[in-house]
Image (tube, rainbow, N blue to C red):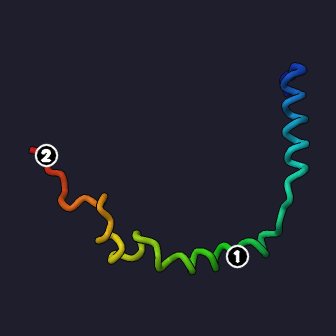
Amino acid sequence: MDELDETQLKNEVDSLKFQLQLTREKSSVTIPELVKWIEEKMAEDPFLNAELMRDNPWVESAKCVLL
């Protein structure tokens, strides 16, 4: 490893202290919650529900054709 100067070491220590304070949850808990949230939002997603795209004023109505 290359030599680190004092500021780099201080930044590394600060980063590690910050990461230590983060609360972590097990994937076995968070993944089912994420799947449930995704399934609840599927009906509202315009990319999965074509009928919702019709109400979107920003959707291009015609394709761009280059001459």
The residue pinned by badge 1 equals: 33
Residue type at mark 1 is: Glu
Residue 43 shown left or right of residue 38 in the figure: left
Is 16 or 55 nearer to us in this picture? Answer: 55
Please tell me whether mark 1 sits on a helix, a strand or a loop. helix
Identified at 33% across, 77% down, the residue is: 51
- Picture quadrant of residue 5: top right
Disc 1 crowd rating (10 Å Cα; few below 14, some 14-19, many 20+) is: few
The residue pinned by badge 2 equals: 66
Residue 15 spot, x, y in % from top left: 84, 39
Identified at 77% across, 70% down, the residue is: 27
Residue 47 spot, x, y in % from top left: 40, 69
Please state which of the two labelled residues, at mark 2 or mark 1, is closer to the viewer: 1
Residue 67 shown left or right of residue 22 in the figure: left
Rendered view: 54 above or below 59: below
Rendered view: 17 above or below 29: above
Disc 2 crowd rating (10 Å Cα; few below 14, some 14-19, many 20+) is: few
Please tell me whether mark 2 sits on a helix, a strand or a loop. loop
First-in-chain label (2 vs 1):
1
